[in-house]
Image (cartoon, rainbow, N blue to C red):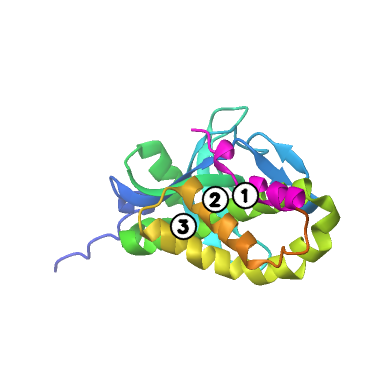
Amino acid sequence: MESARPEPRHDELQPESARLIVANAAHTVFQGPGGRETYSGTKHFSAGTRLHVANAFWGAAGESVQVVGLARHSRRLIHVTIAAQSMYNFRVCTVAQPAVLRKLHARSASYLTFPQSDENLLESAWGLSSYYWLKALRARLTAAVPELRESLIGRPWDRAESHFRNSYRERREQGVAEPEAAEAMALELIAKWDLETLTPTVRHRLEAACHLSDLWQM
């Protein structure tokens, strides 16, 4: 009688490579009310650290992302959950580093065992990257025109967020680079507001706040 084949061990299911969403810890992270506080990198990762996305949790208050990357202090690979708005430069890459795949596989085996298409991965990547630029824009506008926070950053801002994300994704699909897509959407958002009653100086400050490319550091 032929004996049954043993079930493969968990570690035997680990692929040699995988297509994954990859990002970097932002050089300028906006925190606190209105994004008035800024930090370089995050609590766990230095600015610019390459982060491999294991999973994302979508919610109305902002997205949390499980990532694997080299820790700020120990320089060892860690698996933690951080805010999507602290990351940028989201893209899809082939990851083949055994240590990274082992760490991902230990916590998110199904993510590697049942891979997604590049199209679905890119759609998720662009959606996640919009959160950093939305947070940055809100902080810049609040700093530029603090006296208009309630009228321009309150309800009008809440209504504009979904439009910003959708149009941002459309520009990324068209091949527009991440910071340029964010700037274009910021200016489009400002153009939709009723600014006729504002002085030219205030309008100029708002438009200047939409230029976000200086935040882009690789």
The kind of residue tagged 3 is: Trp
3 sits left or right of 84 in the view: left
Give, as a three-letter code, the residue at label 2.
Glu
Q: Would you name the residue on which mark 1 appears? A: 210
State the image coordinates of residue 163 (x, y, percent, origin top left).
Answer: 56, 69
The residue tagged with tag 2: helix, strand or loop?
Answer: helix
Q: Position of residue 202 (x, y in %)?
A: 76, 51
Q: Amino acid at mark 1?
A: Cys
Disc on the earlier residue, 1 or 2: 2
> How packed is label 3: few (under 14 Cα within 10 Å), some, or many (20 or more)?
many
* 59 to the left or right of 169: right
Which residue in the protein does label 3 denote? 126
Q: In the image, is residue 213 part of the stretch drawn in magenta?
A: yes
Could you say which is closer to the camera, residue 112 or residue 133?
Answer: 133
At mark 1, the secondary structure is loop
The answer to which of 35 and 91 lies nearer the viewer is 35
Query: Farthest residue toward the left?
Result: 1
Mark 3 vs mark 2: which is more N-terminal? 3
| Cα distance between the residues tagged 1 and 3 | 19 Å
Q: Is residue 148 above or below residue 201?
A: below
